[in-house]
């Protein structure tokens, strides 16, 4: 019982990371029908960036804000220069290749500069674990799913209550119609990619005290988040967050009941099976194909 | 591409292979230290890489799919070969065959669930496979040896020779790998030029058109991925025999990116691209080793530079330049059409004895959410008649066409084709049943030639299997030649003989419409659905189109025509059905329809009914 | 007579790949004028409008608005200049409420902090009381006629100097059209310049003051709508009587 609660809580924690990243994929895909394939490396910038700035003697909050700011700008630049010009026709694959290329460059450069060793990020929320039903969990770990859920709510409110939020939904629904409302669809898309980058980096910063930051963690995290977003039905943010949290928990249970090394193989296999059962995603909204 | 150019390339390739054959003996002949066994090792390795890239090229260049896990598939093949040799004592040749077969099967498992949705999903799954694969190799120590890998793999033998790079064994390994590379290259050539290769390219360029021609997108893409994985498996098995040691280090994500870079830099979809790309990237990576940890950074940078500066790759750019140089100055002329010849008699499926009606719709209904796009439509098209379906914009005409051709599933009602209930049958099977169609906004396979476009239409007439097509068995050759001859006859029929080698996208618009009809006829249809075939055509072209429809109808082909050009409808149709708000508001002979007040109202509105202009009728 | 046209296009061309949808469209709209463009389906009317509104990039020709060359400006920029389009097929945001759709219509003004949006919203709802009844409903749940009202209302809220209406009648019952066309006429009477593209010629000829006839991607001829209503050439363009009989 205690073990199950333990798996559940720490699963939620890692699921929170997937959720924040998958939410980014969902946002990007909704407005552009494309995404930064290597969003996980932006996530890595959040964690490693904070650690590096901290190492330069900056206070932790300043370091985090700087890292998130860099990721935000990177998200915007990637959209403007690597996705927009390579996503002119439906079903084009150019944007996948360009974003993979930039991802490889980011990881390559940061590994060359900083080494591949994992680096800890101290946090006051990692000092004393909370005791819940026989399980022990650090407040920092619980922070992640909380932030993910709050972000989703905030995003929902933003998209339903603000003019810019409604404009984002308009662009996602119909770019041409949005332009006819006077909305600069390209600029809105750029903003969305910037925010997605920032959220990814926020996740990287928040999880760094739990799992340590390293330059190569981005690939696996980003990939799982992308898969989670796909099987959830990528244009449905709430569905994406739910599936992300569930997937985090499932992973922990696999670790607990099988082994850590089986986690990825079993986890991915489950996702492939779910995709077979729900080719459009679990919470997908129906899209009518135009002939 | 001209024949002289093709012959030049073939000549260069033969010289290259001859050179490669002599290469190991260069030192002996000229008494030089070159090539050392280290040199030969590098060449062998490059050839192995080229085999992987050839497979990737078929996937990326023809099927338009991206794999970021080819290093893992390559590693999968390598491990299969290693384990077969180590644990089961399997010899070289069966080991290679086992690797190819199992890796191809692995490819099918990965591709089948993901290609049905979108290309991006396959890419994601391949990365995932790559990560899991490395993870499993590292963790599953009893089988894979973990970090220390599998070593002391027994050296294979071929024809009694140990597979080494030494002169005393006649450089057997080098020659075996060279042979595999040449074989792979030839297979790439035959696959890309077979009906399967055309289906892959067609599915990548227009899913809708491919489905309308009876091509299953999922099946085609899964096969493309299997073939691609098979090449990776072959290369993996050869690698095992070269290194005699395998562990996960050689099969990481970075290696997958490197393979992709090789395919794209060389020119995805071109025959020579994989060779050029592999050699270029391999030697650049040797140079990049000087940068140590910055090596992967430069891979990314190279990929980015290629995508920006030379998206068609080295070979693709050169080919494009040659085509452009060649095409300037010479404009082919369109010949008279429709040009019916006796060769074309087989084009129309003869109706069964006693069959009088080809199509019968009863209560056909289509709802999108709350909206009723088509509302209880009844329609009968008699065999050999031209039936026009008209109505104002948004009346539901295209939806009817889309249901008959299997693109939309009707919400209610039945569709009968020559008496058989075909309601809800998928588009691919409708094509096989003899329903051919064109599209409102012409959906041609833009980068394929006019002839190839028509040949895709013959996809369903190929009865030879994939292996037969790749091996070019006599049966496969005969079918290919037949399809080619018939496609040429169809091009001649629509007056496009001189445009046979021109890319469909560079045809003038009127010619594109004709080509689309020729392609639809390749299905040997019993029912031809034409969705606004006259839109965008000049008056002269419309007159030709009318004659074409008449020629076909005379041969007992049934035609359902959606059209706005009233001129044309009056001239060509035997029967007209008018839709408005998804319902049939009138049905009858063209003369009756034109004077029907409800029809006039549907088109003009009732606010001010135009006075009948009888006086214009002379 | 001395006033210059609000909108004028010359030799406009639109291409989709190799397809030339519009080969030569030339027309103008004077301030306060209600101009119609009629012609059979596929004549290039909608493509012309989409090129004016900046949804498509013209392949050739010039678009001038209020004297300035605006050829190739993008859609949102045209809205800011004062050109609103009610697009073919209405393009309502189905997952947003009527109110949200209307606010999106006013987006360019809200972003400039225009204080009079609320007042204009009231006026527009006055014009379409049905929308007021359904203000909280999702756009996708409206009937076709209501969606068309919403599309017009949404276009008006950008406070355009020129309103382009593309195929008002598309899929709508005559009863609804009898209600919608007079509303456009009323808006024009209050000074709004309108360019109406309509397949249903009889409606367009009744409400507009001047009409262009398009055929095969060209503007063939134009004239006062009252005269064109009795011009054989118009009916011929639709029914093709001039050739087949």
Image (cartoon, coloured by chain):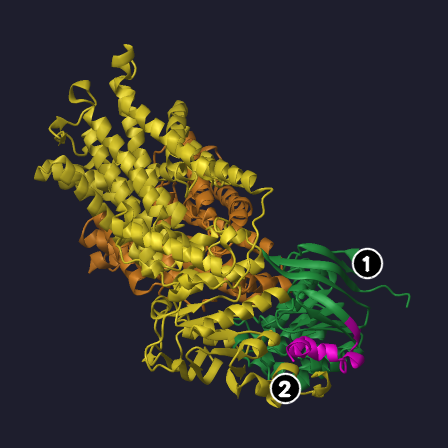
Chain colours: A orange, B yellow, C green
Give the residue at mark 2: B601
Say yes or no: labels 2 and 1 on the same chain: no
Give the residue at mark 1: C67
Q: Nearer the viewer, mark 2 or mark 1?
A: 2
Give the residue drawn at x 32%, y 38%.
B185
Give the residue drawn at x 70%, y 82%.
C203
Give the residue drawn at x 53%, y 38%.
B321
- Residue B311 belongs to magenta span: no
Q: Which mark is residue A54?
A: none
A185 vs A136, left or right, is right
Range of residues picked out in magenta: C222-245
Could you tell me residue B245's position as x and y percent? 19, 31
**On-image quarter of the C terminus of chain B:** bottom right
Subunit that carries the residue with mark 1 = C
Secondary element at image label 2: helix
Could you tell me residue B438's position as x and y percent? 47, 66
Number of marks:
2
In this view of the protein, can residue B502 be seen by the observer? yes
């Amino acid at each position: 019982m205690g073990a199950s609660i333990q798996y559940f809580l720490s699963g939620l924690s890692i699921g929170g990371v997937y959720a924040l990243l998958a939410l980014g994929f969902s946002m990007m895909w909704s407005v552009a029908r494309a995404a930064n394939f290597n969003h996980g490396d932006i996530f890595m910038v959040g964690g490693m960036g904070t650690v590096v700035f901290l190492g330069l003697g900056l206070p932790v909050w300043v370091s985090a804000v700087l890292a998130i700011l860099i990721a935000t700008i990177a998200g915007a630049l990637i959209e403007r220069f690597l996705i927009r010009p390579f996503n002119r026709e439906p079903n084009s694959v150019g944007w996948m290749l360009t974003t993979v290329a930039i991802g490889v460059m980011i990881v390559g450069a940061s590994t060359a500069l900083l080494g591949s060793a994992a680096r800890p990020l101290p946090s006051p929320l990692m000092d004393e674990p909370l005791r819940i039903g026989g399980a022990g969990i650090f407040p920092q770990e619980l922070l992640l799913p909380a932030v993910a859920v709050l972000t989703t709510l905030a995003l929902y409110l933003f998209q339903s209550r603000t003019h810019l939020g409604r404009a984002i939904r308009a662009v996602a629904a119909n770019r041409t119609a949005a332009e006819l409302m006077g909305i600069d669809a390209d600029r809105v898309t750029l903003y969305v990619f910037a925010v997605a980058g920032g959220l990814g980096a926020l996740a990287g910063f928040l999880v760094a005290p739990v799992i340590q930051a390293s330059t190569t963690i981005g690939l696996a995290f980003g990939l799982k988040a992308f898969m989670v977003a796909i099987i959830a039905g990528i244009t449905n943010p709430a569905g994406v967050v739910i599936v992300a949290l569930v997937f985090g928990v499932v992973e922990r249970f696999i670790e607990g009941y099988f082994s850590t090394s089986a986690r990825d193989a079993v986890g991915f296999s489950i996702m492939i099976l779910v995709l077979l059962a729900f080719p459009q995603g679990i919470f997908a909204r129906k899209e009518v194909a135009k002939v | 591409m001209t024949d002289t150019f093709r012959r030049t390339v073939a000549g260069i390739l033969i010289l290259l292979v001859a050179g490669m054959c002599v290469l190991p003996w260069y030192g002996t002949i000229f008494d030089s230290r070159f090539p050392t066994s280290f040199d030969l090792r590098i060449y062998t390795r490059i050839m192995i890489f080229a085999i992987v890239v050839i497979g990737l090229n078929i996937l990326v260049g023809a099927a338009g799919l991206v794999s970021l896990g080819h290093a893992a598939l390559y590693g999968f093949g390598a491990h299969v070969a290693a384990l077969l040799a180590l644990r089961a004592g399997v010899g070289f040749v069966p080991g290679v065959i086992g690797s190819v077969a199992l890796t191809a099967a692995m490819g099918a498992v990965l591709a089948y669930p993901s290609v049905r949705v979108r290309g991006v999903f396959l890419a994601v799954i391949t990365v995932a496979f790559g990560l899991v694969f490395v993870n499993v190799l590292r963790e599953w120590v009893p089988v894979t040896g973990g970090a220390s890998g599998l070593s002391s793999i027994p050296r294979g033998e071929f024809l009694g020779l140990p597979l080494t790079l030494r002169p005393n064994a006649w450089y057997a390994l080098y020659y075996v790998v060279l042979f595999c590379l040449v074989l792979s290259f030839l297979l790439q050539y035959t696959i890309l030029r077979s009906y399967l290769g055309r289906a892959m390219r067609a599915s990548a360029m227009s899913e809708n058109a491919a489905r309308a021609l009876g091509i299953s997108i999922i099946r085609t893409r899964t096969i493309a991925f299997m073939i691609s994985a098979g090449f990776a498996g072959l290369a993996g098995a050869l690698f095992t025999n070269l290194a005699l040691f395998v562990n996960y280090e050689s099969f990481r994500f970075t290696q997958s990116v490197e393979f992709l870079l090789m395919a794209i830099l060389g020119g995805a979809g071109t025959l020579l691209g994989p060779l050029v790309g592999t050699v270029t990237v391999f030697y650049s990576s040797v140079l990049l080793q000087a940068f140590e940890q910055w090596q992967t950074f430069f891979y990314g940078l190279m990929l980015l530079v290629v995508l920006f500066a030379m998206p068609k790759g080295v070979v693709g750019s050169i080919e494009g330049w040659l085509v452009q140089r060649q095409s300037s100055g010479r404009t082919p002329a369109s010949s008279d059409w429709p040009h019916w010849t006796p060769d074309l008699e087989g084009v129309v499926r003869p109706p069964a004895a006693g069959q009088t009606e080809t199509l019968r719709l009863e209560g056909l209904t289509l709802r999108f959410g709350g909206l009723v796009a088509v509302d209880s439509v009844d329609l009968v098209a008699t065999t050999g008649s031209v039936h026009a379906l008209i109505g104002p914009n948004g009346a539901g005409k295209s939806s009817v066409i889309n249901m008959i051709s299997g693109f939309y599933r009707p919400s209610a009602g039945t569709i009968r084709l020559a008496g058989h209930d075909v309601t809800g049958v998928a588009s691919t099977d409708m094509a096989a049943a003899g329903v051919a169609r064109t599209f409102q906004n012409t959906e041609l396979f833009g980068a394929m030639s006019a002839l190839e476009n028509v040949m895709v239409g013959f996809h369903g007439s190929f009865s030879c299997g994939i292996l037969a097509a790749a091996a070019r068995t006599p049966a496969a050759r005969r079918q290919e030649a037949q399809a080619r001859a018939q496609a040429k006859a169809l091009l001649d029929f629509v007056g496009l003989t001189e445009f046979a080698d021109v890319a469909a996208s560079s045809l003038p618009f009127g010619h594109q419409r004709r080509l689309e009809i020729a392609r639809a006829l390749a299905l040997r249809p019993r029912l031809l659905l034409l969705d606004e075939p006259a839109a965008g055509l000049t008056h002269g072209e419309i007159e030709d189109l009318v004659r074409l429809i008449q020629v076909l109808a005379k041969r007992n082909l049934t035609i359902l025509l959606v059209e706005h050009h009233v001129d044309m409808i009056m001239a060509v149709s035997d029967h007209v059905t008018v839709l408005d708000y998804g319902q049939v508001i009138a049905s009858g002979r063209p003369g009756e329809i034109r004077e029907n007040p409800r029809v006039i109202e549907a088109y003009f509105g009732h606010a001010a009914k135009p006075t009948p202009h009888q006086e214009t009728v002379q | 007579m001395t006033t210059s046209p609000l909108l004028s296009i010359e030799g406009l061309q639109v291409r989709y790949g190799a397809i030339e949808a519009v080969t030569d469209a030339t027309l103008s709209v004077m301030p306060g004028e209600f101009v119609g463009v009629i012609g059979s389906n596929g004549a290039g009317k909608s493509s012309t409008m989409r090129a004016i509104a900046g949804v498509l990039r013209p392949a050739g020709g010039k678009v001038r608005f209020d004297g300035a060359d605006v050829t190739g400006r993008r859609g949102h920029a045209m809205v800011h200049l004062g050109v609103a389009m009610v697009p073919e097929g209405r393009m309502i945001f189905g997952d947003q409420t009527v109110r949200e759709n209307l606010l999106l219509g006013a987006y360019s003004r809200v972003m400039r902090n225009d204080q009079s949006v609320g007042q204009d919203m009231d006026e527009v709802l006055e014009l379409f009381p049905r929308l007021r009844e359904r203000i909280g409903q999702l756009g996708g749940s409206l009937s076709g006629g209501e969606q068309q009202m919403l599309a017009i209302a949404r276009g008006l809220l950008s406070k355009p100097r020129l309103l382009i209406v593309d195929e008002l009648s598309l899929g709508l019952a005559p009863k609804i059209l009898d209600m919608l066309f007079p509303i456009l006429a009323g808006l024009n009477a209050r000074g709004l310049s309108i360019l109406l593209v309509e397949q249903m010629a009889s409606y367009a000829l009744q409400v507009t003051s001047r009409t262009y006839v398009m055929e095969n991607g060209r503007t063939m001829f134009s004239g006062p709508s009252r005269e064109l209503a009795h011009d054989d050439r118009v009916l011929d363009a639709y029914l093709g009587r001039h050739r087949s009989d």
